[in-house]
Structures are given as structure tokens and as C-alpha cells.
């Protein structure tokens, strides 16, 4: 264990890790610019359901509507220990409605006390934070156990990414700033942090970062062009109408949609770039006498193998959330030409294909840059006769 700690301190990524840790602390301290003062009048608490009364519910086919009355005991918050009636409104939406059973734990909204000490309790949803916390902790423990200090840095990069999106990117979008430029800035920042935590500041970092940004640039350019050519509006994004009705009607949703395309693909591009850079570095370490052309060829070969699976991975990642929609199309016998021409289907096709363009182009970009930066022998000399490349 002591040897691992010494290696961690000696690692090129130690100083960047400290910087990222400080950045995480700063981001955690940033105030919420868009905090709604209305929510301050209420308290979200954990409550145990003691009993339920379903007499106010009606059912029509699969749809349940009406009001479920619950008797709950407040477990946390200022009203801890209090027993109160709570209201659970059913709107007829299978996606959003929830029914509670005695013994379950729920997240409830507790209103402020009135003059006579009465407070109103509204059921929000089943309480899931404890299971989410257990799952996250189990993943972190497993990652650190298998990857050691690299796993610690991976967790830091994950936390930093979440905070950057929540504390910087989303507020910039809501503030009406150019979404494409903001997306490019955040993508560059996150990519830099992720890669520097792997390599530290050296030539491998420069190679992987350059390859990733070039591939992301291709993705962004194609997104800008084809979103306009295909007349896809940003309102195709989920909850975009709710956003407009929340007082942000002046937002350019199309620019936000374009930004979301290359932001979403940047993670896969970083993965490919790091894989190729690491492979090229190993090739050079094993045979330092290889010329740049041979090293670039080796990087291209690694890239071809990776692309064989990553493109399909991107397809599965994007389409996995639309299994229900695809089943509806098949069940209703919707013609394929109609399916492919729907705006939200076209938007997903755009996401998949343009993201795949980025994957395909990041491989040669990274191979060329990493081969140029990492190989020690110039192009013009003949390849060493002992080389198999």
C-alpha cells in the first residue's frame, strides 16, 4: 500500500488531480443562480406510509385518476415524528403517477406551518435516494478496488463532469448565451480534465486531446449543417416545451440541440483517442526505433479495431431509451417511411450518424497526432528491418 501511495505522489497526474479536487470544491460552493424562492417555503422530507385510503380513486381501463389519501409519519425535517394526512393526486398518466402502499417510504412536500400549527403534506414520489447512494458507493468501491489510484481519478473526473454540467453549462444555457460556443467550451474543459487525469501533462495528453477535439469539431460542424438542412427544431428535445413555459421562451432551443449532439458524443471520442494514444505509446516504448509512419500505421490499426465496436455501442446507447417507442411503431404497423421521417426519429438518427462520424474521424486524427508527437524517428528514414510493422 505504501508503494502505491508513493507511486501516486510520483505520478505525472498527481498535480492535476489536486487542481481538479480544488476545482470540485469551488464548484460545490458556487451559489445556484436560478434558485426558485417559491421552493424555500416548503420542506422536502422522508416519510413512512402508515395507511392508505383508495376510495377517492377511479379506474378506466389502465388509467387511474382521482386522489389517494395517505397517513404518513414524517421521518426527517422540522416535523420529524409528526403523523399527518397526505394527498396523492393521480392525473391519469402511467408515466408520472404512483400509488403508495402501507410500509413504503416516500418523499413528501411539507408546507409551512399556519397560525394554528397545521401543515400540509403532499406525496411526491417513492423515496429512492438511499438505494441510489448504495449503488454509487458500491460502484466507487469496485472501481477503486480494481483500478487503484486511476479509479480515484476516474471518480474525480466523474464528479467534476457532473458539477460542470450542473453549475456551469446549464446556467449558461438558461442565461441565453450562445449554446454552441458554451457547449464547445465545456466539452474542451471536460475533455482536458479527463485526459490530464489519465496521463498528466505530457505528449500523450497533447496527442489524445488534439485528436478528441478534432473529432468533436467534425461532429459539431456536421450537426450545425444537417440540423438546418433537415429542418429539425430544438423543441424535439424532451421537456423543451416545459422549459419554454417556465419563463425561458427566448431560448434558442435549436442551438442547444446542436450543442447536445457533440457534447453527447465527446465521451466516446475521448475513449477512442485515449485508447489509440496509449497503444501508440506502448508501441514506441517497446520499439523506440520505429519511424513515425510505422507508428501512425500501428495507431490506425488500433483505431480500426476499436471502431468496429464503438459505432454499434453508440447506436445501442442512443436507441436503448426508445425501445418503448419502437414497440409502439411495430405494434401499430407504422410504415417505415413514416417512422424515419418523424422529427424526433430523424433527430435520433442525426445523433447516431453524426456521432459515428466523429468516432470514425477521431481515429486517424489521433493516430497521426500521437504518431507524430510520440515517435522519435523521422518519416524519411527507412523502417527498421527488425520491425514487424
Image (cartoon, rainbow, N blue to C red):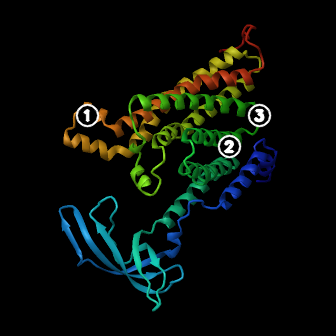
Q: Rounded to the nearest whole Å, what is the CA distance between mark 3 and mark 1?
A: 51 Å
Q: Is residue 117 left or right of residue 1?
A: left
Q: Rounded to the nearest whole Å, what is the CA distance between mark 1 and mark 2?
A: 43 Å
Q: Is residue 81 left or right of residue 283?
A: left
**Label 3 belongs to which residue?**
202
Front label number (3 vs 1): 1
Q: Is residue 117 left or right of residue 387?
A: left
Pick the front one: 144 or 168 = 168
Pick the front one: 70 or 149 = 70
Front label number (2 vs 3): 2
Q: Position of residue 296 (x, y in %)?
A: 65, 19
Q: Position of residue 207 (x, y in %)?
A: 69, 29
Q: Position of residue 318 (x, y in %)?
A: 43, 40
- The residue located at (50%, 70%) in the rendering is 39
Q: Residues within 10 Å of mark 1 (few under 14, many from 20)?
A: few
- Please indicate, yes or no, whether residue 356 appears anywhere in the rendered image: no
Q: Residue furthest left?
A: 61
**Label 1 belongs to which residue?**
338
- The residue located at (46%, 36%) in the rendering is 314
Is tag 1's residue or tag 2's residue first in the polypeptide sequence? 2
- The residue located at (43%, 31%) in the rendering is 228
Q: Is residue 188 above or below residue 38?
A: above
- Please indicate, yes or no, whether residue 128 appears anywhere in the rendered image: yes
**Label 2 belongs to which residue?**
193
Looking at the figure, which quarter contains the C terminus? top right
Residue 368, picture quadrant: top right
Q: Position of residue 200 (x, y in %)?
A: 75, 40
Is tag 2's residue or tag 3's residue first in the polypeptide sequence? 2
Q: Secondary structure at mark 3?
A: loop
Residue 63, picture quadrant: bottom left
Q: Rounded to the nearest whole Å, what is the CA distance between mark 2 and mark 3?
A: 13 Å
Amino acid at each position: 500500500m505504501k508503494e502505491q501511495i508513493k507511486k501516486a505522489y510520483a505520478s505525472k497526474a498527481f498535480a492535476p488531480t489536486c487542481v481538479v479536487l480544488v476545482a470540485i470544491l469551488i464548484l460545490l460552493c458556487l451559489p445556484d443562480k436560478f434558485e426558485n424562492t417559491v421552493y424555500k417555503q416548503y420542506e422536502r422530507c422522508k416519510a413512512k406510509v402508515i395507511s392508505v385510503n383508495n376510495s377517492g380513486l377511479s379506474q378506466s381501463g389502465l388509467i387511474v385518476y382521482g386522489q389517494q389519501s395517505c397517513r404518513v409519519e414524517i421521518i426527517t425535517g422540522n416535523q420529524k415524528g409528526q403523523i399527518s394526512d397526505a394527498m396523492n393526486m393521480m392525473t391519469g398518466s402511467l408515466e408520472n403517477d404512483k400509488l403508495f402502499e402501507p410500509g413504503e417510504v416516500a418523499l413528501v412536500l411539507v408546507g409551512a406551518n399556519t397560525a394554528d400549527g397545521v401543515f400540509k403534506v403532499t406525496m411526491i414520489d417513492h423515496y429512492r435516494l438511499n438505494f441510489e447512494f448504495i449503488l454509487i458507493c458500491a460502484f466507487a468501491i469496485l472501481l477503486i478496488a480494481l483500478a487503484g489510484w486511476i479509479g480515484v481519478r476516474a471518480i474525480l473526473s466523474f464528479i467534476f463532469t457532473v458539477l460542470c454540467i450542473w453549475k456551469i453549462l446549464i446556467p449558461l444555457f438558461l442565461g441565453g448565451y450562445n449554446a454552441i460556443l458554451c457547449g464547445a467550451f465545456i466539452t474542451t474543459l471536460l475533455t482536458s480534465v479527463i485526459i490530464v487525469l489519465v496521463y498528466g501533462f505530457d505528449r500523450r495528453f497533447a496527442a489524445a486531446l488534439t485528436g478528441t477535439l478534432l473529432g468533436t469539431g467534425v461532429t459539431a460542424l456536421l450537426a450545425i449543417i444537417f440540423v438546418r438542412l433537415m429542418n429539425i427544431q430544438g423543441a424535439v428535445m424532451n421537456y423543451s416545451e416545459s422549459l419554454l413555459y417556465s419563463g425561458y421562451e427566448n431560448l434558442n432551443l435549436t442551438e442547444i440541440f446542436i450543442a447536445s449532439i457533440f457534447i453527447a458524443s465527446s465521451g466516446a471520442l475521448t475513449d477512442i483517442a485515449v485508447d489509440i494514444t496509449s497503444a501508440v505509446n506502448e508501441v514506441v516504448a517497446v520499439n523506440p526505433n520505429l519511424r513515425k509512419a510505422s507508428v501512425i500505421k500501428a495507431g490506425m490499426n488500433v483505431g480500426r479495431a476499436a471502431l468496429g465496436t464503438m459505432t454499434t455501442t453508440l447506436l445501442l446507447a442512443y436507441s436503448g431509451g426508445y425501445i418503448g417507442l419502437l414497440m409502439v411503431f411495430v405494434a401499430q404497423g407504422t410504415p417505415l417511411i413514416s417512422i424515419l421521417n418523424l422529427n424526433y426519429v430523424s433527430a435520433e438518427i442525426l445523433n447516431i450518424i453524426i456521432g459515428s462520424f466523429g468516432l470514425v474521424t477521431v481515429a486517424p486524427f489521433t493516430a497521426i497526432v500521437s504518431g507524430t508527437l510520440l515517435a522519435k524517428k523521422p518519416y524519411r528514414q527507412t523502417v527498421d528491418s527488425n520491425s514487424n510493422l
